[in-house]
Each structure stands twice: as structure tokens, then as C-alpha cells.
Image (cartoon, rainbow, N blue to C red):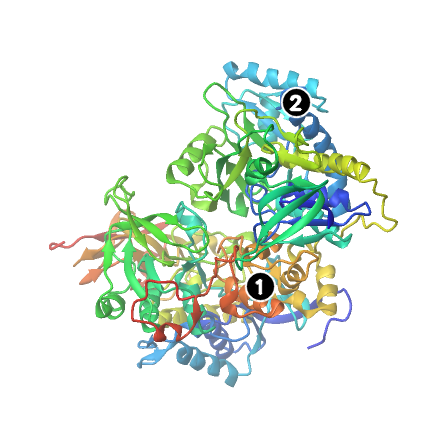
């Protein structure tokens, strides 16, 4: 019997786990995937929004503002990459100026600090590569950029250090009432199933949160639509091309795309918004990517397309019919806490929602605060940001710091091993990539993949052929040399 | 070598520091040694010498240099043996993190920790990397099973593991062709090799020996326009390419099932260190701009091999390494070469030429000046002309020029003396 089962190890679920871990509760986080943050959290713009955008009075407005205020302190205490670089919402003609003025007024109503409309001279001095046609912009000094995976990992690791259990590859296929508690039916990857019991369930299942809600509630009926956002990522040589996150002011013609530095030092362009049928459809499309490039050229006229190193798409968990966040208990399912429709500004709002839920739930369960609670995490060390004397000392203590595995991002073996031994261990190549950046650079893992799979196999005691890219069906290596000799010449079936 | 026991970087002083112990770096080290500079440090990020040759277990190496046919490891071993014989200091698992001012390197290794290597000259011999799916902007899902050809070669030949068995390959560069054959040897089914342009980027002999001999179809003017599959790749979308615009033709996509997509779409000189150090690069070659001494825009830093421009034969890489090694030795012996930038001649790629190395020729150039370049298209019976101030001063005839094969011409440097620019120009022959 668990006090709280959190379904979903994205930013929302891990934020709840982090804040609930303060209390003397038996907490379990389950996720259908192989790692934290594999859904909506993984692939988005990584923007901490100032809060000028949501309609005043909505949950989005409230938690956006509260969340954005929490970020600087959390980044310091939990050691994840966050930079308050400021956002610009740019008007590219005098006709577009009223739109930024409208956002300015809305921001003031929402309580956003430091908003200012800046004129052409100041704007172009701030961003020299910005389209010369830009006339003015809304300057949002509280806007920031974050590594969404990084903050989620920080939440998960502190939660784990405080006793929260994480279970991956664990899919919840049904939830039933069992007296005053909840019974969760779990499908394991091996095809078996089991039942878990919980006093409280938090539905932080992102794209599947509508489905999960439908297991317990008839009244609170809503549907989550996966809406894809496609992105292009530019080489680090362009990481300083823009210092602020540059939005195009929304017009009747569209919401526009953003051009933004990332905390890792690349430059991000995107997203668009395309409805998709299934929750796994994270493919990119030729048309989508071409359109993004075209739209972004409004911000940056001469985008160096030759320096694009990769493209990707993420899915937003949007509730199209009622686009505000759906937070809290449905009337017919007390003890079942929804975090649904958690699209933008979900990343910004998550810490505030997690804190809010932790307060309500701890009170409901009359849980006391733990006497010994770890509220600090040292930022993971990265070779690429360490000083020469820090590196020298690190190698003297552990020679693995001197062995570079990923040359493009300068990631050492020690960093990879640390990720493999984390309180919430990385188990796959993708998990290593998100945690250490190994394989994220120019060569896109061409050189480091063979080394990374050896480290994963060694640390987790598995064969090279069992190492996966991500999900447990994504094996990277089909067999050892010679394995095909035992098969007919051309095998069409799955030999593994 | 002293172990670092505290948080202080070590300092090494040396005459010549060489980045990379592949074909270029080893040849540079040996030739610099033979030219009289014995204080040399080579830094190699892997645990063994030879660079990419280690995984090239096929033969065909060394026909020019050794007049016999060797495998990659055999070729590497000969180069390594020469360095070993001279007692040249090669540091393994040693990664150069950056090139600092005053020909200094920041090097990291598990053995000596972080070191500042103060050299009198540096030779860049870092080789190249492969172009990736991201650089091609191939849309679709991001499943397991998409690899570059060199990575596949390494997995099979050095790690003994096979990443796929129903294979579609995009691009027909030499590594790709060799890997296609290698996959067939492992029992995999290579369904097709696609090539966006109307000619292959691979050597003719490789197309015959690796594709034709095994009945693997080479489909010209076709490319991959989609990747399908959630966890492991299940299929690719293959589209026809419009020859004049080089763009995929919408509506022509055919779904081809596979469990691996191999990319062999070109190599990129690995100049991240050079770029960060402010060394001027040539957009055409994607390597450093060098003079006939293989010296870059930063005095005392030389470049050779695939980091300077992508070669098709290792024999020429070794040759270039030797030239750069001799130049670096002379630079050290003369305590820096005199600045003569004013009277240099710039070599410009003219019609049909992608790039020329070296890009600059100084008045100190010998009578026998070697120029290497690549053409952009196939030319039958072409004429190569060297033009100064619009006037042709020298012509060369060749039976055929193809983009896959680097072209060499030897020129009397006197022809260029006093001219600001010289242009290399290709004219198609009668029967094109």
C-alpha cells in the first residue's frame, strides 16, 4: 500500500514527487517509458515564460507567475541549468505594434515584473542579427531558458534521495476504487500484470492523462489531443547569435515561431503546431521543417541552414475544448488528482503545481514533515564547464575524468558512469544523452555511441546486444558477429 | 611522466605537438623527426594509433606509397612502426580540448590529467567526421537503427557486433560501399544504395567490387525522404530526385521496409578546435586555409590529411603529413618563418573546381608546386588550365576527372610569382 502513487515521470510528476518527498509518506512514481521525461517534457522549447501570455484569471496565469518566480531559487538549490536571459516579443511592422501593447497590458494584469516596450534602436542593439524591419518589442526580463530534462532529473533525484521509489516500463492499464483507496492495474513489459494500492493517485500522465482520468471519472470528461511542435537545432557556433528568447508577436496570420539560445549553447528554432492522432507520433515532416525555416526568417533573415545539426518534434498535451490546465480532483473521484491539459506554460508552472499539490495532499493525509529532508542537490559536473584546476583535481581523484568519450560535447567517462549510477539511473543511450549530452553534438553520436554502449553494458551487467536507444524495443545491436549465419540467407522476421 | 597529484595542470614543453596519430599525424611525426626535430609529442584520443585505418580491414591501401596492397591495419602498422623505431612520444587516450594562443594546447588524459603543452609548432591531424541525418534534415521518427557508415564499420570490425540485417544505404561514398559489402559478408541483406546526385561519390573500383559483385542495386537520383518506426526503424521513404534542382520530387515516395538505415553522405574535416582557435577556414574544402608549407593563418600551426581536406586515398594523406611535418620542422629550426604574407598568390577555384589546396602560395615556394583539388562534376577528356590575371599560363590534359577522385597537378611556382591570384579552371573535352 502506497500513500501516493504518481503516474508519469515527466516534469509534473517529478515536481510533485520532489515536494511530497518532504513529508513522511510512502511514495511511488511509475512511468510507462524507460526513463524520466520521455514525453512532452523532453521535446519542447525549454522556455520559462514570464507570464504575459495566459488569460488573466486562469490557472495558467496563476501557476505561470508562481512557477517562474520559483525557478531562480530552484536552479540554485537543485543544480540544474537555467538562465534568465529575458524574452522579446517582437513587432515587425507598425501594424503589429498594438499586439505587443496588448500583451504588455495583459502581463501587467497577471503581475509580471519588469515588463517594458523597447524601441527599434535599443532592440537592434540588443539583438544585432534581428531582422532590421523589427520596429519594437515587449521586453520580458523574467523570461528564461531551462533544460527541461535537467530540472526533471533534479526533482527526481532529490525525490529518490528522500525515499521516493521510481518504477519504469510500468504501464497503468486501469484504475479502480477499492473502498477508500485506489487500485492500479499495472502491465509489465514481460506481459505479466500486478495490482498496486494507493490512498492518493496523481495523474501526471501527460498525453495519456485524459485516458487515465476516464478510468475514474465520468463527470470530468475531457480529451487530450497530441499537438506536435517541430524544431530545428543549430550548431553551437550560433549559440550566441541571439541572447534573448525572441518570439514573434502573434498576429491573425499565426502564432509565429521563436528563435532562442538554449542553456546548452545551441540555437533553437521552432515550433509549429500540428494535431496528431497518436501519442507516439513524434516524427518530423519535410513540410513542417521547411515552414519553420521560412517563418523563422522573419526573425532572422539569413538563417545558416547548413549549420542545422538536428531536428526533432515533441507533443503537447492539449485539451482543445477547454484549454486551461485541469488541476485537482474530479467531483466523482476524490483522492485522484489530475494534472491535465498541461501544455504551455506547463514547464514554467510545474514547480508551483507540485508545491501546491504537496501542500493539499500532505494535509489530506495528515503527514508530518520528515526530520531529515535533503533539499539540496549538487549540480552534475561537466568537463565542458569545469576550470583547468577543477579538471586536474578531478582526474587525480578519478582517472575516468580524463577519458573523453564524446568529443563534440567534451563528455568524460566519469560523467557517463555517474549518470549510470544516479539515484534514478540512466539505463539507455538516450538517457545518457539527455543527462550528459554525449551524442548531442555535431557528429550526433557517430564516434561516442560505440563507447557509450560498452559503458552501459558494463555498468548494468548486460550484453552489448541488450543495450537500447530508448524503449525496450529499441535495441541498437541485433546480434554478435555470426548471428546471421544461423538464419536463412535473407531473414525478414525478427531474429531477436 | 609525472602524475598530477594536486589541482594544478601539468605543463609540458615540446618542439612540435601533433594532434592525432592517424595516417597524417604519424607521417608528420616521422618526417619532422627525420628533418632533425626530435622533441615531438603526439596526442591521440583513442587507445591505439592508426585512426580510422584500424577499422578498415579491407585491402586496397598503400598501392602508391608501398607499391603493394595492404589492409588498413597493416598500413597503419607500417606507419606506426616508423614512429616507434624513432622513439617518437605518442600519448594515448589524450584528448586536445583546445588550441590556445602561442602554439599551446590544453590536453586531457587519464594518465597525466590536464596539461598545457607549450609547443614551438603544432600540426593539426585530427581527421574528419561523418555527415549525419540531422545535417541532411531527413524528417520522420527517431528510432534505433539509423547509423553512419563509419560507425557500422567500427561496430562490426572492432566490437564484433552487427547493428542491422535488412539494410538501406543512403549515399555511396567509399566508406559506405565498403560497409555495404561488409554487411553482406555478415549475412545481412543490403537492399539498395541510394544516391541523391546522378553520380556516385565513391571510387569506381569500389562500386564494382562492393555493389556490382554482390548484386546490390545503386539507385542514382534517389534519396531518403522519411524514416518510419517507433522503437526500431521499420522502413524508409525513398523518393526520386529532380536532377537540376537536386530536390526530392513530391509524390514519388516509395516505402521500403528495413531494420537499418546506413548513411554514407560525406565526411567533414573535424575543425572544431581550429575554428575555436581562430584559424581561417576555407568554405570549399572545409579545412584550414594553408600555404604551400601547409601552414595555416596562425603562424606555427600546420594542417594535413583529412582535417585539411577529405582525401580518397590514404597514400596522399601520408604524403601530405610528410610535407607538413617537414615544414613544421623547418619552422622550428628557423625559429619561426619570416612573415611574407604580402607577396603571396591566392589560388582560386575557377569553373568546375570545388576547392584547391594550398590556397596560398608564398614567394618561398619551390619550383615544383603541388596543387590538389576536387572537381564538382564528371569531365571527360578535360583541360585543366592555370590562369593568372585572366591569362592561361599552363594547361594539363586528363582522360577523365570525377568528383570522387582528388586531382593533383604539379606546377612551377615561378609562373605565379608576383601575381595576386591564380585560378584553376576546368573545361570539358570534345566528347563530354
Front disc: 1 or 2? 2
Question: Visible in this render: residue B362?
Answer: no
| Residue A66 in the image, given as x and y percentages of width and height | 73, 30
The C terminus of chain B: image quadrant: bottom left
The quadrant in which the N terminus of chain B is found is bottom right
Give the mark nearer the N terminus: 1 vs 2.
2
Instruction: Please determine whether, in this image, residue A199 is positioned above or below residue B278.
Output: above
Please give the count of numbered marks on the rendered protein. 2
Q: Residue at x 24, y 69 (%)?
A: B214
- Find numbered disc 2 in the image and state the secondary structure of the residue it sits on: loop
The percent position of residue B85, horizontal first and vertical second, equals 51, 85
Whether residue A318 is visible to the viewer of this picture, yes or no, is yes
Using the image, determine if residue A196 lies above or below residue B99: above
Which of the chains bears the disc numbered 2? A
Q: Which residue is mark 2?
A: A58
Q: Position of residue B71 (x, y in %)?
A: 36, 78
Residue A348 appears in which quarter of the rendering? top right
Q: Residue furthest left?
A: B431
Q: Are marks 1 and 2 on the same chain?
A: yes
Disc 1: which chain?
A
Query: From mark 1 to mark 2, how far is it between C-alphas?
Result: 47 Å
Viewer-side residue, B342 vs A225? A225
Residue extending farthest front? A179
- Please give left or right for residue A71 compared with residue B77 in the image: right
Query: In this picture, is A151 found above or below A103?
Result: below
**Residue drawn at (57%, 27%) of the image:** A124
Q: Which residue is mark 1?
A: A405
Give the image quarter of residue A383: bottom right
Amino acid at each position: 500500500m502506497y500513500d501516493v502513487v504518481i503516474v508519469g515521470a515527466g516534469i509534473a510528476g517529478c515536481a510533485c514527487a520532489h515536494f511530497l518527498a518532504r513529508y513522511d509518506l510512502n511514495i511511488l512514481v511509475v512511468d510507462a517509458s524507460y526513463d524520466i521525461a520521455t514525453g512532452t517534457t523532453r521535446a519542447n522549447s525549454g522556455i520559462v515564460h514570464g507570464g504575459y501570455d495566459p488569460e488573466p484569471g486562469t490557472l495558467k496565469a496563476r501557476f505561470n507567475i508562481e512557477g517562474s518566480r520559483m525557478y531562480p531559487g530552484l536552479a540554485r538549490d537543485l543544480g540544474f541549468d537555467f538562465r534568465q536571459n529575458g524574452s522579446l516579443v517582437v513587432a515587425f511592422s507598425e501594424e503589429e505594434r498594438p499586439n505587443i501593447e496588448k500583451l504588455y497590458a495583459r502581463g501587467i494584469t497577471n503581475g509580471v515584473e519588469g515588463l517594458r516596450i523597447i524601441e527599434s534602436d535599443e532592440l537592434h542593439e540588443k539583438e544585432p542579427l534581428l531582422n532590421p524591419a523589427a520596429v519594437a518589442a515587449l521586453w520580458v526580463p523574467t523570461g528564461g531558458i531551462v533544460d527541461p530534462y535537467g530540472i526533471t532529473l533534479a526533482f527526481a533525484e532529490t525525490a529518490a534521495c528522500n525515499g521516493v521509489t521510481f518504477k519504469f516500463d510500468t504501464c497503468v492499464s486501469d484504475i479502480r476504487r477499492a473502498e477508500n483507496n485506489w487500485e492500479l492495474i499495472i502491465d509489465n513489459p514481460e506481459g505479466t500484470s500486478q495490482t498496486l494500492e494507493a490512498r492518493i493517485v496523481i495523474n501526471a500522465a501527460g498525453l495519456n492523462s485524459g485516458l487515465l482520468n476516464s478510468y475514474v471519472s465520468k463527470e470530468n470528461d475531457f480529451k487530450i489531443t497530441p499537438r506536435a511542435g517541430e524544431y530545428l537545432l543549430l550548431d553551437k557556433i550560433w549559440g550566441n547569435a541571439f541572447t534573448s528568447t525572441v518570439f514573434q508577436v502573434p498576429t491573425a496570420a499565426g502564432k509565429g515561431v521563436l528563435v532562442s539560445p538554449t542553456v546548452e549553447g545551441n540555437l533553437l528554432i521552432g515550433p509549429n503546431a500540428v494535431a496528431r492522432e497518436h501519442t507516439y507520433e513524434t516524427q518530423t515532416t519535410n513540410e513542417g521543417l521547411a515552414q519553420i525555416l521560412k517563418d523563422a526568417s522573419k526573425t532572422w533573415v539569413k538563417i545558416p541552414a547548413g549549420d542545422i545539426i538536428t531536428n526533432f518534434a515533441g507533443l503537447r498535451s492539449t485539451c482543445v475544448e477547454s484549454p486551461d490546465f485541469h488541476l485537482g480532483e474530479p467531483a466523482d473521484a476524490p483522492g485522484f488528482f489530475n494534472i491535465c491539459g498541461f501544455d504551455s506554460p506547463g514547464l514554467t508552472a510545474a514547480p508551483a503545481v507540485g508545491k501546491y499539490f504537496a501542500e493539499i495532499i500532505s494535509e489530506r493525509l495528515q503527514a508530518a514533515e520528515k526530520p531529515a529532508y535533503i533539499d539540496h542537490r549538487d549540480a552534475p559536473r561537466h568537463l565542458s564547464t569545469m576550470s583547468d584546476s577543477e579538471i586536474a583535481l578531478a582526474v587525480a581523484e578519478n582517472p575516468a575524468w580524463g577519458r573523453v568519450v564524446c568529443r563534440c560535447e567534451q563528455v568524460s567517462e566519469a560523467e557517463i558512469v555517474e549518470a549510470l549510477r544516479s539515484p534514478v539511473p540512466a539505463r539507455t543511450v538516450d538517457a545518457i544523452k539527455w543527462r550528459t549530452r554525449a551524442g548531442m553534438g555535431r557528429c550526433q553520436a557517430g564516434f561516442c555511441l560505440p563507447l557509450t554502449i560498452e559503458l552501459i553494458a558494463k555498468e548494468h551487467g548486460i550484453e552489448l546486444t541488450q543495450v537500447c536507444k530508448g524503449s525496450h524495443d529499441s535495441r541498437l545491436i541485433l546480434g554478435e558477429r555470426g548471428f546471421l549465419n544461423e538464419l536463412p540467407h535473407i531473414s525478414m522476421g525478427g531474429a531477436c | 611522466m609525472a602524475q598530477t597529484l594536486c589541482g594544478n595542470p601539468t605543463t609540458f614543453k615540446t618542439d612540435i605537438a601533433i594532434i592525432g596519430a592517424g595516417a597524417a599525424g604519424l607521417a608528420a611525426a616521422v618526417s619532422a623527426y627525420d628533418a632533425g626535430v626530435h622533441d615531438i609529442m603526439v596526442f591521440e584520443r583513442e587507445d591505439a594509433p592508426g585512426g580510422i585505418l584500424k577499422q578498415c580491414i579491407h585491402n586496397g591501401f598503400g598501392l602508391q606509397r608501398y607499391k603493394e596492397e595492404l589492409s588498413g591495419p597493416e598500413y597503419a602498422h607500417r606507419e606506426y612502426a616508423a614512429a616507434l623505431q624513432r622513439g617518437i612520444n605518442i600519448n594515448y587516450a589524450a584528448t586536445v580540448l583546445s588550441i590556445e594562443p602561442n602554439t599551446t594546447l590544453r590536453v586531457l588524459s587519464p594518465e597525466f590529467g590536464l596539461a598545457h603543452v607549450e609547443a614551438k609548432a603544432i600540426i593539426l591531424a585530427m581527421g574528419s567526421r561523418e555527415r549525419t541525418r540531422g545535417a541532411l534534415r531527413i524528417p520522420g521518427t527517431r528510432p534505433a537503427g539509423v547509423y553512419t557508415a563509419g560507425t557500422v564499420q567500427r561496430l562490426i570490425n572492432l566490437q564484433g557486433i552487427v547493428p542491422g540485417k535488412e539494410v538501406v544505404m543512403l549515399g555511396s561514398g567509399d566508406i559506405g560501399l565498403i560497409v555495404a559489402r561488409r554487411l553482406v559478408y555478415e549475412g545481412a541483406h543490403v537492399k539498395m544504395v541510394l544516391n541523391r546526385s546522378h553520380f556516385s561519390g565513391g571510387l569506381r573500383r569500389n562500386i564494382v567490387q562492393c555493389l556490382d559483385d554482390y548484386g546490390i542495386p545503386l539507385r542514382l537520383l534517389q534519396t531518403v525522404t522519411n524514416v518510419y518506426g517507433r522503437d526500431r526503424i521499420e522502413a524508409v521513404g525513398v523518393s526520386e530526385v529532380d536532377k537540376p534542382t537536386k530536390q526530392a520530387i513530391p509524390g514519388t515516395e516509395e516505402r521500403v521496409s528495413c531494420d537499418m538505415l546506413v548513411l554514407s553522405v560525406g565526411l567533414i574535416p573535424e575543425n572544431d578546435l581550429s575554428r575555436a582557435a581562430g584559424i581561417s577556414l576555407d568554405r570549399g574544402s572545409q579545412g584550414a586555409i594553408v600555404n604551400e608549407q601547409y601552414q595555416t593563418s596562425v603562424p606555427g600551426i600546420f594542417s594535413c590529411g583529412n582535417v585539411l581536406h577529405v582525401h580518397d586515398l590514404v597514400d596522399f594523406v601520408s604524403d601530405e603529413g610528410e610535407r607538413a611535418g617537414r615544414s613544421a620542422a623547418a619552422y622550428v629550426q628557423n625559429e619561426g618563418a619570416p612573415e611574407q604574407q604580402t607577396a603571396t598568390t591566392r589560388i582560386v577555384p575557377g569553373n568546375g573546381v570545388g576547392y584547391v589546396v594550398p590556397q596560398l602560395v608564398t614567394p618561398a615556394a619551390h619550383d615544383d608546386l603541388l596543387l590538389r583539388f576536387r572537381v564538382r562534376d564528371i569531365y571527360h577528356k578535360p583541360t585543366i588550365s592555370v590562369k593568372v590575371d585572366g591569362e592561361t599560363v599552363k594547361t594539363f590534359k586528363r582522360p577523365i576527372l570525377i568528383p570522387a577522385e582528388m586531382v593533383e597537378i604539379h606546377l612551377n611556382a615561378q609562373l605565379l610569382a608576383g601575381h595576386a591570384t591564380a585560378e584553376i579552371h576546368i573545361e570539358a573535352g570534345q566528347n563530354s
